[in-house]
Image (cartoon, helix red, strand yellow):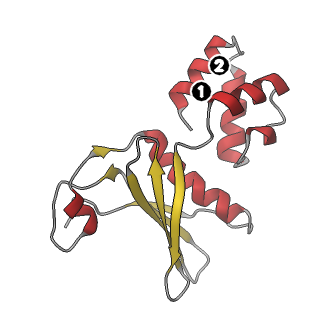
């Protein structure tokens, strides 16, 4: 979710300060996937948020499971068309680790790495990083599971 855009909408709409806290609880606590689920907000505000503030700055376009079924890699498209990858690793002890990207591309240019061969394009925004975690948190929540750990991809760290 674009937090800057959200703040602008709330300010333009003269919403009280507590609306921001309600939204944070809905998004990060209740893990809503649609503004219509934020039933603690007025209907008019939910409609405006649906029209103006997408709940995610990333779009899942491809995914694959490991042979053992304990890892899921997802390719996301960012709003500017850049692509990134994130991985959900499910551990035997019930933990779920999310490995998130912090950059589109990588400046190291390691010959063995597809990300490195593509070159560095930019650092991700906080919203883009958080949205990777939220994607998997929502997915896990459907099965009454949660994210246990978050780690960052080893891009640029050979």
Q: Residue at x 28, y 54 (%)?
A: 105
Reading the image, the residue beneath label 2 is: 10
State the separation of the CA atoms marked 2 and 1: 6 Å
19 is higher (above) or lower (below) than 63: above
Q: Is residue 117 above or below residue 59?
A: below
Other residues around mark 1 within 10 Å, as few (<14) / some (14–19) / many (≥20): some
Tell me, yes or no, whether the two marked residues, 2 and 1, touch with CB atoms within 8 Å: yes
For residue 108, the mark is none
Query: Judging from the image, what secondary structure is the residue with disc 1 in?
Result: helix
Q: Position of residue 93 (x, y in %)?
A: 59, 81
Quadrant location, the C terminus:
bottom left
Q: Which residue is mark 1?
A: 6
Percent x, y for residue 99? 44, 63
| Secondary structure found at label 2 | helix
- Spot the residue most to the bottom: 68
Q: Quadrant of residue 40?
A: top right
């Amino acid at each position: 979710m674009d937090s800057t855009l959200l703040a602008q909408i709330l300010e333009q709409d003269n919403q009280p300060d507590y609306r921001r806290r309600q939204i944070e609880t809905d998004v990060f606590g209740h893990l809503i996937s649609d503004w219509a689920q934020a039933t603690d907000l007025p209907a008019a505000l939910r409609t405006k948020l649906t029209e103006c503030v997408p709940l995610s700055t990333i779009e899942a376009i491809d995914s694959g499971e490991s042979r053992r079924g304990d890892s899921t890699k997802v390719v996301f498209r960012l709003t500017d068309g850049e692509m990134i990858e994130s991985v959900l690793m499910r551990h035997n002890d019930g933990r779920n680790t999310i490995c998130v990207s912090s950059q589109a591309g990588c400046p190291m240019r390691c010959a063995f790495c597809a990300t490195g061969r593509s070159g560095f394009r930019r650092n991700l925004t906080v919203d883009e990083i958080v949205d990777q975690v939220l994607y998997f948190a929502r997915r896990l929540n459907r099965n009454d599971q949660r994210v246990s750990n978050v780690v960052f991809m080893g891009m640029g760290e050979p």
